[in-house]
């Protein structure tokens, strides 16, 4: 009896030792990752807020409380104007890029998914831009859309459109169309600058392969019986697409939209190389403004406040998407 | 991915000819910039800037590459990038393997809290940490405590500044955790009975059967490292340290209107990563399909 109790005690103790050993070993395994994440991801998120509370021009200055935020949002007319304008540019950029990109990707994926010779070749080509560096690819686009020597204008010349200045054109595209038709549009209807449209074209070119890939994966998950059953019921091609493909693809559509909008909101490299925020600041998105404020003007405190605001915008935007869009997603 | 190989039959929308036409048109638009880059790289200055542009160089000028190469220490830039990317890939894999294994195969206190922490860092956009990390990389100004409140690592313009922030990747941990979770429990139990501890099991059994996942993590990490621009642009200043993308951007100012030279430079900066893509396509496509990381 007592011998058994001792054995049980010993077994419990040895299990404790083993568990303790396993705990220690697990922490050891996790140590490098946790330490690095803490140092370069978690703590910096707090530093960002800390920095944003100071006048910090190259070196740390006086504590300002929330004054940096107040300046950016309304108190300082120049800064507030720049910030709200950059925010509007950012969302305009997203609004012209994402729908076209997703629509095109969906069509291509739908066509590519069907039984077809050479699908793998097509897929390889479509995906190529995504792996290419944004810097190199942007430099190529600068020349393709060069006002004088670029092949893009050459091609458009065939259709009687000439002399577009693309990445150097601050005029709104609707305004330009209006002018061409002899109508003078009011300022608010000028539309995004041709330069911003150019950046959007680059963005679509660069990321479409990724979206096609995700959609292809989603199409593969739709049971073919659904189509066969619907066809027996006499559904038309459009009905099949509208009533079966689209709803069952909604998880991928939602995913691509969420990831895509975050990517567009954060875009930096291509804008930096293609336009550097110009012409006349018409492509200066929030991430360009943050970069300009903190890196080129050395106003680290203000830049950090803008960075915090941008982060909040991205998180809020993501949250809204999950709250309102995900309800419409059908997970089969 | 399996479904892709299954060659399913969706309802045919249109004839196969018109489908190919659509796909070829899109393929042409997607591939044209690459064609344009390479053909322009082989033109001379006059032909690269004629209107209308020629479709194909009338005369091939491979010596453009020699000229570009002689203008900048490209070998050094390549070496910098290869070193930074190689170290990042190796370090990221080792660190992620250990953490992923702990999450998948070990029991310890605080597992859920730590996992939530990893998830939180994954959700956080890079903008949040760009400026503080930049401040951290600089030296502490005189009179400032280098450890408080923001540690100053004094790593500006070093390789370490380009490597350290990317060594721990929550995404790689998730990907490998999935892989390790899939290892059958019986395998682990059998190893335990044979007296193998965690380290031994990880090294002799878990790793060898996880090679495809490791390759995926490695390729994604290498690709991100090779194409990195904003961060190295901010934290490097000298050619001895500068990686290839930052050097290419700087060269575009130097090249000015010599676009044939700039295209030659762009093409050799892009070439290694495109080759890697063509060779390791399977792994990259798999990984990206799971990540959803944009840019």
Image (tube, helix red, strand yellow):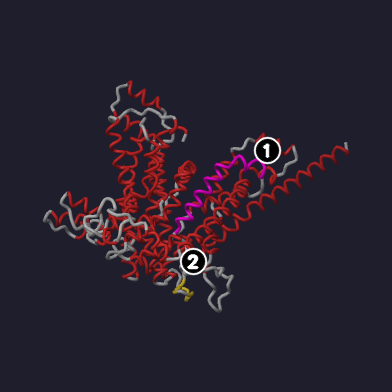
Left or right: A83 in relation to B75: left
Check the image and report above or below for B112 versus A64.
above
* Start-end of magenta stretch: B203-228
Q: Main secondary structure of the magenta part?
A: helix
**How far across and down, in percent of the image, does residue B227 sit?**
45, 56
Q: Residues within 10 Å of mark 2 (few under 14, many from 20)?
A: some
Q: Nearer the viewer, residue A35 or B204?
A: B204
Residue located 24% across and 61% down the image: A169
Q: Does the rendering let one see residue A268?
A: no
- Dot 2 and dot 1 within a common chain: yes
Q: Nearer the viewer, residue A214 or A146?
A: A146
**How far across and down, in percent of the image, does residue A192 sit?**
26, 56
Whole-angstrom CA distance, mark 2 to mark 1, is 44 Å
Q: Does the rendering let one see residue A128?
A: yes
Kindly identify which residue carries mark 1: B188
The reply to whether callout 2 and callout 1 are in contact (CB within 8 Å) is no
Instruction: Give the chain letter at badge 2.
Output: B
Q: Is residue A58 magenta?
A: no
Identify the secondary structure beneath mark 2.
helix
Q: Nearer the viewer, residue A24 or B220?
A: B220
Instruction: Give the chain letter at badge 1.
Output: B
Of the two numbered discs 2 and 1 on the same chain, state the one appearing first in sequence.
2
Residue located 33% across and 46% down the image: B30
Res A69 label: none
Q: How many marks?
A: 2
**How far across and down, in percent of the image, does residue B112 sit?**
60, 47
Q: Residue furthest top?
A: A232
Q: Nearer the viewer, residue A139 or A305?
A: A139
**How far across and down, in percent of the image, does residue A31 sit?**
63, 55
Res B134 label: 2
Q: Residue furthest left?
A: A182
Q: Is residue B205 magenta?
A: yes
């Amino acid at each position: 009896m007592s011998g058994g109790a001792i054995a049980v005690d010993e077994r419990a103790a040895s299990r404790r030792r083993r568990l303790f050993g396993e705990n220690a070993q697990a922490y050891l395994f996790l140590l490098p990752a946790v330490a690095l994440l803490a140092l370069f991801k978690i703590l910096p998120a707090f530093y960002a807020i800390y920095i944003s509370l100071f006048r910090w021009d190259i070196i740390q200055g006086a504590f300002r409380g929330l004054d940096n935020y107040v300046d950016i949002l309304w108190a300082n007319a120049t800064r507030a104007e720049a910030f709200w304008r950059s925010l509007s540019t950012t969302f305009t950029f997203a609004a012209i890029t994402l729908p076209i990109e997703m629509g095109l990707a969906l069509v291509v994926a739908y066509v590519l998914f069907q039984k077809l010779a050479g699908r793998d070749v097509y897929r390889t080509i479509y995906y190529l831009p995504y792996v290419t560096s944004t810097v190199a690819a942007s430099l190529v686009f600068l020349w393709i859309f060069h006002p004088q020597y670029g092949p893009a204008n050459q091609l458009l010349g065939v259709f009687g459109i000439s002399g577009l200045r693309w990445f150097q054109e601050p005029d709104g595209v609707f305004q330009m169309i209006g002018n061409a038709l002899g109508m003078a549009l009011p300022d608010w209807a000028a539309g995004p600058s041709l330069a911003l449209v150019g950046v959007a074209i680059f963005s679509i070119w660069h990321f479409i392969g990724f979206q096609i890939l995700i959609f292809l994966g989603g199409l593969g998950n739709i049971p073919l019986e659904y189509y066969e059953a619907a066809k027996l019921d006499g559904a038309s091609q459009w009905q099949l697409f509208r009533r079966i493909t689209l709803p069952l693809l909604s998880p991928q559509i939602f995913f691509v939209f969420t990831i895509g909008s975050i990517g567009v909101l954060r875009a930096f490299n291509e804008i930096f190389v293609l336009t550097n925020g110009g012409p006349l600041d018409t492509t200066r998105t929030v991430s360009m403004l943050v970069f300009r404020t903190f890196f080129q003007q050395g106003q680290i405190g203000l830049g950090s406040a803008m960075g915090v605001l941008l982060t909040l915008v991205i998180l809020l935007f993501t949250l809204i998407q999950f709250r309102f869009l995900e309800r419409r997603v059908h997970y089969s | 991915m399996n479904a892709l190989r299954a060659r399913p039959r969706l309802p045919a929308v249109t004839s196969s000819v018109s489908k190919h036409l659509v796909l070829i048109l899109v393929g042409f638009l997607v591939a044209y910039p690459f064609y344009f880059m390479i053909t322009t790289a082989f033109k001379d200055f006059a032909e690269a800037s004629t209107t209308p542009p020629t479709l194909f160089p009338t005369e091939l000028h491979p010596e453009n590459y020699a000229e570009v190469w002689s203008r900048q220490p490209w070998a050094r830039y390549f070496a910098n990038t290869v070193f930074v990317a190689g170290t990042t890939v190796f370090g990221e894999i080792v660190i992620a393997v250990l953490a992923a294994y702990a999450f998948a195969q070990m029991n310890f206190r605080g597992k859920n809290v730590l996992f939530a922490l990893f998830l939180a860092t994954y959700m956080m956009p890079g903008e949040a940490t760009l400026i503080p990390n930049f401040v951290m990389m600089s030296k502490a100004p005189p009179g400032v405590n280098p450890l408080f409140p923001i540690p100053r690592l004094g790593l500006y313009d070093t390789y370490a500044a380009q490597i350290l922030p990317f060594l721990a990747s929550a995404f790689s941990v998730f990907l490998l955790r999935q892989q390790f979770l899939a290892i059958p429990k019986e395998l682990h139990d059998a190893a335990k009975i044979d007296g193998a501890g965690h380290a031994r099991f990880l090294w002799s059994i878990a790793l060898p059967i996880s090679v495809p996942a490791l390759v995926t993590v490695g390729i994604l990490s290498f690709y991100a490292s090779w194409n990195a621009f904003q961060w190295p642009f901010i934290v490097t200043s000298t050619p001895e340290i500068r990686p290839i993308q930052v050097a290419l951007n700087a060269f575009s100012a130097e090249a000015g209107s010599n676009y044939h030279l700039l295209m030659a430079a762009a093409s050799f900066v892009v070439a290694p990563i495109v080759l890697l893509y063509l060779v390791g396509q399977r792994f990259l496509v798999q990984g990206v399909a799971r990540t959803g990381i944009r840019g």
